Amino acid sequence: MSLNGSSAPAAGNRTSSSGEPFSLLSLLALSLLALLTAATLVWNLLVLVTILRVKAFHRVPHNLVASTAVADALVAALVMPLSLAKELSAGRRWRLGRRLCRVWVACDVLCCTASIWSVAAIALDRYWSITRHLDYTLRARRRASNLMIGLAWALSALISLAPLLGWGETYYSAEQERCQVSQEPSYTVFSTCGAFYLPLCVVLFVYWKIYKAAKLRIGGRGRRNAVLPLPELGQVKEVSHQPQMVFTARHATVTFQTDGETWREQKEKKAAMMVGILIGVFVLCWIPFFVTELISPLCSCTIAPVWKSIFLWLGYSNSFFNPLIYTAFNKNYNNAFKNLFARPR
């Protein structure tokens, strides 16, 4: 969310306003930001095309993945290019007018908030599928996912449109060429809590519950399972009524007793790992930005523009990492990607 203001840059960072060329470091940083923007857009569009083309992906949880990809693709298409244009201007000033400023800020808040809440929805879906796999049927899962998608975008729209409806006008100074979201303290608390701190509490609670449930299930299975050597195959039914797998090597026969949960436990472990990485990257990307955005208006603190830009683009980078994470843990996506670019024979 582009809540960063702008002020005069340090003397060593002046560029076009004084007629000086960009420094080598500035050119490198701007090139990396442009590459990040393009890669974020392409990768999320690739995920969306894959979901649309593969019928097996026309179900939950892929609709949650699609919602996240839509939000992240909009961040790359509508928000990051204008943010990059602001970075290119001297002193990180806004020179595109008041109307475009309001559109940019509204799109920024809407898309970034929707992306954040979509990550929380994915975490909730994984949590319910692990802890309530008997009650969380396909129909219940579809209803829950559709409801979460609707609520995510509705709340995002509410937060983004509130300044346009009169709660703290989007801040634009024609004299100083600054463009940022409303600095009204009450709106700052509402927007930061609704866009980040509330979903942060949700995902942290969910991951703690997933980890606890997975640890309890695996620990319980370890106490139930046993490995029993049998002198001959005929005694298998007398030893146990649990599901068994029998392996014969020459004259010796060994029976491994299992409770039939091996496949599910592997799936749960993989889901817990995916959710953990998704949440970890989400927190690392966004927490510096939202901490400064909550504190600055309340304490009238001044943060250097360069640090605001770093925190802002670190948050944007979360839209690049999201599709990488949830596709890396799904082999079906990798196969679908290969089929997209495979030449028909």
Image (spheres, rainbow, N blue to C red):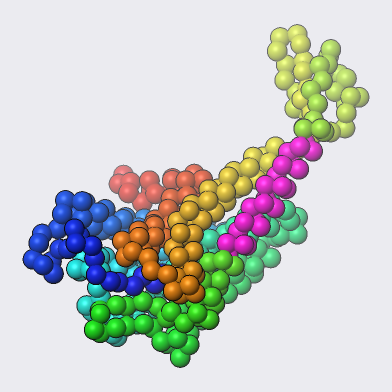
Extreme-top residue of the structure: 251
Question: Residue 177's spot in the image, x, y percent?
Answer: 25, 79
Question: Residue 35's spot in the image, x, y percent?
Answer: 27, 55
Extreme-bottom residue of the structure: 166
Q: How many marks?
A: 0
- Location of residue 46 (image quadrant): bottom left
| Residue at position x 36%, y 82% in the image | 171
On screen, residue 148 versus residue 7, left or right, reads right
Depth check, front residue: 36 or 176: 176
On screen, residue 253 versus residue 130, left or right, reads right
84 to 109, vertically: above or below: above
Q: Is residue 141 visible?
A: yes
Q: Quadrant of the N terminus?
A: bottom left
Extreme-right residue of the structure: 238
| Residue at position x 18%, y 54% in the image | 27
Q: Is residue 41 visible?
A: no
| Residue at position x 56%, y 66% in the image | 197
Question: Residue 261's spot in the image, x, y percent?
Answer: 73, 40
| Residue at position x 81%, y 32% in the image | 223
- Location of residue 149 (image quadrant): bottom right
On screen, residue 35 versus residue 22, left or right, reads right
Question: Residue 166's spot in the image, x, y percent?
Answer: 45, 91
234 to 300, vertically: above or below: above
- The verdict on residue 213 being magenta is yes
Q: Which residues are magenta?
A: 199-221
Depth check, front residue: 150 or 99: 99
Q: Quadrant of the C terminus?
A: top left
- The verdict on residue 115 being magenta is no
